[in-house]
Image: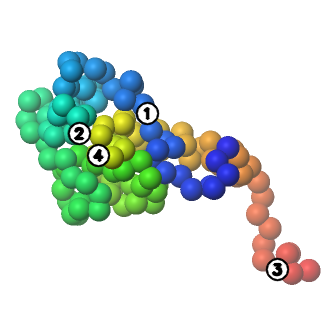
Amino acid sequence: ADPSGVLTAGKMINSAAKATFVSPKYYLLDNKTNLTLELDEDNHPIRAHIENQPVLIKSYPDIQEGETSLILVSENTVLRDIMKAKVCCNFPLVIVSRDKKFRGIITEKDILKTLLMKGKERDLGSRNVQKEEELEK
């Protein structure tokens, strides 16, 4: 359990090992769309492609409404900010970096699993909530 209660990219990350290593400079991030990520010699993300078509990589918070860019966040980016970026971009996954080096990805499934686990820690969900008037009695 996380004592701080703050959900960050680093705590939700799917390690780089979960992305399929294609060659020394390429990772396959998503099989459905054939999304690949190209890294430079220092493991910095430099280009992405879907079916050989280039996709922009944009760092949070430089994301604009309606963009179809791949989102890059640092591992200390909080979930609230990741969700804001995802709403703007509507891209199914987020790239996570540490010191601008590729660390892994976060999918929508990772976010949901993290929230469900957080809910279990706090015993949320089916518990009845008392009305305000009942609490004042």
Seen in the picture, residue 25 relative to 129 is either above or below; the reply is above
- The first of marks 3 and 1 along the sequence is 1
- The first of marks 1 and 4 along the sequence is 1
Residue 93 visible in the displayed image: no
- The first of marks 4 and 3 along the sequence is 4
Residue closest to the eye, 12 or 65: 12
- Tell me how far mark 1 sits from mark 4, CA to CA: 17 Å
- Secondary structure beneath dot 3 equals helix
Residue denoted by label 1: 14
Q: Position of residue 51 (x, y in %)?
A: 12, 29
| 35 relative position to 115: left or right | left
Here the colouring is: rainbow
Seen in the picture, residue 75 relative to 49 is either above or below; the reply is below
Residue denoted by label 3: 133
Residue closest to the eye, 10 or 137: 10
The numbered disc on residue 34 is none
Camera-side mark, 3 or 1? 1
- Tell me how far mark 4 sits from mark 2, CA to CA: 6 Å
Label pair 4/2, CB-CB below 8 angstroms = yes
Q: Amino acid at mark 4?
A: Lys
- Tell me how far mark 4 sits from mark 3, CA to CA: 52 Å
Q: Amino acid at mark 1?
A: Asn
Seen in the picture, residue 104 relative to 130 is either above or below; the reply is above
Q: Residues within 10 Å of mark 4 (few under 14, many from 20)?
A: some
Picture residue at 23% right of the left edge, 35% below the top: 42
| 123 relative position to 30: left or right | right
The numbered disc on residue 44 is 2
* Residue, far right: 137
Picture residue at 25% right of the left edge, 34% below the top: 43
Camera-side mark, 4 or 3? 4
Q: Amino acid at mark 3?
A: Glu
Picture residue at 45% right of the left edge, 39% below the top: 13
